[in-house]
Image: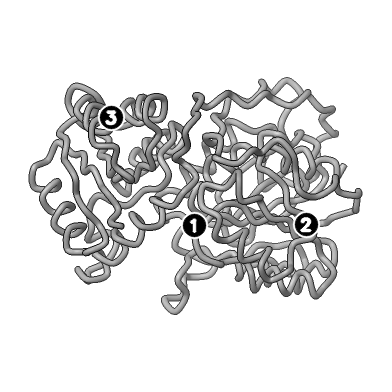
């Protein structure tokens, strides 16, 4: 059965181009188009598409406002189109927070000079998000995440790569939860973890990851005792804006990783888009050019693998929502070294790909819902 798509953009040229690309796939049917957010809502209600492609900047009603209304009235997976700029990144992150599932650069030439590659990527995205957990019968608006209780802030450390947070740092701003899935997420499928002296927390994710990471990291206290590395599949123009967003929301510090950064407790380093992040035995971060032979830049397997070599059995690795199987082979190396591997459960994932690869490979020591992962990390590490 063909995937029904609604194309929303105020540019007639772009509507035609996206429609032509999608219609060339026999398993995709463009059922309608809209020129602004208000039309998008009306068309979504009338046509009940499986996927909506959405521009941000439109007359009458912008894309983010339209996404919020659609998620309230007829929840549908939304693929946002974005510019590869710092402002474009900020807007796209707002759209994901509002309920959009994924995004692509609006300038297709930013993706690839190969037109066939562009067509393949767009159609693959549409097929993938059509199967996401963003559609369900009983929907309630995303609820703000309750901020964790303030934790005592330790004395200032001697590290100077990023300033420590003062005790008076305000509570994080509310973070919107991912929409509830079709299956209940009331209980975790694994028991609460046992405490262990982990030397590193490593989290890998892809589609659905920006909101999932916000959900998890806002539950960590400022005195979190382990360094943190984050690997999110994301373009180079986006990771700095995303790190800044997380830093404002969280009690821990978050920054885009730079070559030579030193891991320290309470600091999360986000792998820069378009590059690879590795960790050496001294706790120093190495940022390497993105290898064209690798599908993902940054790649979870690369960072997990280097952590396995440097930290042995002292790593807690968590694989969150995302397409594909990135992280599985790195998790295998961590597991062989005695480290712990957690996976997000299917019901709370936007896309159950990466966590499923961990579970199917029998690498998961625990499987938790997104709501439970943050608190269990605290229980395991503090």
x 73%, y 39%: residue: 372
The answer to which quarter of the image holds residue 39 is: top left
Mark closest to the chain's N terminus, 1 or 3: 3
Say which of marks 1 and 3 sits in front: 3
Q: Is residue 120 visible?
A: yes
Helix, strand or loop under label 2: strand
Helix, strand or loop under label 1: loop
Out of 140 and 224, give the one closest to the viewer: 140
- Quarter holding the N terminus? bottom left
x 35%, y 29%: residue: 70
Q: What residue is pinned by disc 3?
A: 45
* Image location (x, y in percent) of residue 17: 13, 54
- Asked whether disc 1 touches disc 3, contact meaning CB atoms under 8 Å apart, the reply is no
Mark closest to the chain's N terminus, 1 or 2: 1
- Quarter holding the C terminus? top right
Residue 246 shown left or right of residue 225 in the figure: left
* Image location (x, y in percent) of residue 150: 78, 24
The answer to which quarter of the image holds residue 243 is: top right
Spatial CA span between label 1 and label 2: 20 Å
- Asked whether disc 2 touches disc 3, contact meaning CB atoms under 8 Å apart, the reply is no
Say which of marks 2 and 3 sits in front: 3
Residue 323 shown left or right of residue 364 in the figure: left
Helix, strand or loop under label 3: helix
Spatial CA span between label 1 and label 3: 32 Å
Q: What residue is pinned by disc 1?
A: 233
Mark seen at residue 316: 2
Q: Is residue 232 visible?
A: no
Mark seen at residue 67: none
């Amino acid at each position: 059965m063909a995937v029904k798509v609604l194309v929303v953009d105020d540019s007639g040229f772009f509507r035609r181009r996206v429609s032509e690309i999608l219609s060339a796939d026999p398993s995709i049917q463009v059922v309608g188009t809209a020129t602004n957010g208000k039309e998008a809502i009306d068309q979504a209600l009338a046509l009940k598409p499986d996927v909506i492609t959405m521009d941000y900047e439109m007359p009458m009603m912008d894309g983010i406002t339209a996404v919020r209304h659609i998620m309230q009235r007829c929840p549908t997976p939304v693929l946002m189109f974005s510019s590869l700029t710092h402002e474009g990144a900020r807007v796209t992150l707002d759209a994901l927070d509002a309920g959009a599932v994924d995004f692509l650069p609006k300038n297709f030439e930013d993706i690839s000079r190969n037109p066939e590659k562009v067509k393949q990527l767009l159609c693959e995205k549409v097929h993938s998000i059509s199967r996401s957990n963003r559609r369900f019968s009983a929907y309630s608006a995303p609820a703000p995440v309750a901020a964790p209780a303030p934790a005592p802030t330790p004395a200032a450390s001697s590290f100077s790569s990023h300033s420590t947070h003062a005790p008076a740092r305000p509570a994080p701003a509310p973070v919107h939860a991912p929409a509830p899935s079709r299956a209940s997420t009331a209980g975790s499928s694994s028991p609460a973890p046992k405490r262990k002296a982990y030397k590193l927390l490593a989290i890998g994710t892809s589609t659905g990851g920006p909101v999932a990471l916000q959900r998890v990291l806002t539950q960590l206290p400022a005195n979190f005792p382990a360094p943190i590395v984050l690997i999110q599949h994301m373009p180079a123009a986006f990771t700095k804006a995303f790190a800044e967003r997380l830093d404002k929301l969280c009690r821990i510090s978050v920054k885009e990783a730079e070559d030579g950064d030193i891991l320290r407790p309470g600091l999360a380093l986000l792998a820069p888009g378009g590059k690879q992040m590795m960790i050496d035995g001294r706790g120093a971060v190495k940022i390497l050019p993105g290898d064209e032979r690798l599908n993902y830049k940054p790649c979870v397997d690369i960072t997990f693998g280097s952590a396995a070599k440097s930290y042995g059995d002292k790593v807690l690795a968590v694989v969150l929502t995302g397409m594909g199987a990135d992280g599985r082979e790195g998790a295998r190396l961590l597991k062989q070294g005695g480290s712990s591997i957690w996976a997000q459960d299917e019901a709370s994932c936007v896309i159950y790909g990466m966590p499923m690869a961990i579970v199917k490979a029998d690498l998961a020591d625990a499987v938790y819902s997104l709501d439970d992962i943050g608190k269990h990390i605290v229980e395991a590490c503090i």
